[in-house]
Image (cartoon, rainbow, N blue to C red):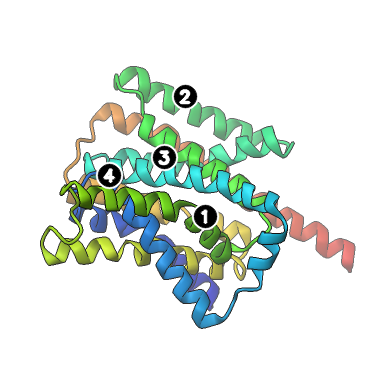
Amino acid sequence: MDRGILSAVGAYLLWGILPVYWKLIDTIPAIETLGHRMVWSLVFVVAILTVQRRWEWVRAVRNQPRKYLIFLLSAVILACNWFTYIYAMNTGNIVEASLGYFINPLVSVLLGVIFLRERLRPWQIVAVSIAGIGVFYLTFQYGDFPWIALTLALTFGFYGLIRKTAPLGSLTGLTVEMSILFLPALIFLFSLDWTGTAAFGHSDHMTTFLLALTGVATAMPLLLFAYGAKRVMLSTIGILQYIAPSLQFFLGVVIYKEPFTTTRLIGFLFIWTALAIYTLDRIVYQRSRKKVESVVFE
């Protein structure tokens, strides 16, 4: 197995098991954990860029303020996604969070149609329709609007849409985003310390250490994904991306014993059926394109 696939698999495995990490600090308010995630992520990525001596992009951002505005928007959306995810971990909603990332590929397809004027293939329309039925079923039969799942799917979908057209790569783009969020997060954390309500440095040593490690937990899978995505076919990435929500679902149901009723199962079956159709359509489409290209260039 080549390094690209190993890196991509590693990224999705880390994303899949990260609920275990967040559950270790689930007694800390989600907003405080989010602040540490912002601060320590910048520290970690700056350390990597310093070792690699990759600072040429700073001039480009400085000379073109419009690029900074793009990352301001993506940073705000990313912060909303992170807060919702941490909140889901803190409140015992890992299963619903996994639903959000199962839905995400289909949301991305819809965003491509709306904003990039991409056209849906017939089976993609079927997949999106079935997923929509699943969401409505969960809402009306389960009696609880799946706002965590939809917020995660929409924010990550919009984040991917913005980053698709952003002028910087994964690591440098994340650095700009974290530099935007760093100062507000740092001021907030200092205010908590000032009022004596901060967990960092005032809890046990393990909690303080885990909060400081949030930067590594955040950036490491992103770096692995960025390395793998450049070296692996898009169709392969499309299949591998289901590793993370599948692991999250397993952790929620089997390890943390979250309720998974028959009603929820039926709703999830709609989503999984939609994903199966979407994935198969994507594989067939990629193969047909390869055949056409091989004929053209022969």
Nearer the observer: mark 3 or 2; the answer is 3
Distance between mark 4 and mark 1 Cα atoms: 20 Å
Marks 4,2: beta carbons within 8 A = no
Q: Is there any visible trace of residue 22 in the rendered image?
A: yes
Distance between mark 1 and mark 3 Cα atoms: 23 Å
Nearer the observer: mark 4 or 2; the answer is 4
Please give the count of numbered marks on the rendered protein: 4
Badge 2 crowding class, 10 Å Cα cut-off, few under 14, some 14 to 19, many 20 or more, is some
Distance between mark 1 and mark 2 Cα atoms: 35 Å
Q: Amino acid at mark 1?
A: Glu
Marks 1,2: beta carbons within 8 A = no
Badge 3 crowding class, 10 Å Cα cut-off, few under 14, some 14 to 19, many 20 or more, is many
Q: Amino acid at mark 4?
A: Ala
Q: Which mark is residue 133?
A: 2
Q: Quadrant of the C terminus?
A: bottom right
Residue at figure coordinates x 47%, y 24% from the top left: 133
Secondary structure under tag 4 reads: helix
Q: Is residue 87 above or below residue 186?
A: above
Nearer the observer: mark 1 or 3; the answer is 1
Secondary structure under tag 3 reads: helix
Q: Which mark is residue 30?
A: 4
Q: List x then y, in percent, for residue 196.
A: 15, 49
Q: Is residue 88 above or below residue 193?
A: above
Residue at figure coordinates x 57%, y 81% from the top left: 53
Residue at figure coordinates x 30%, y 59% from the top left: 17
Distance between mark 3 and mark 2 Cα atoms: 15 Å
The residue to which callout 3 is attached is 100
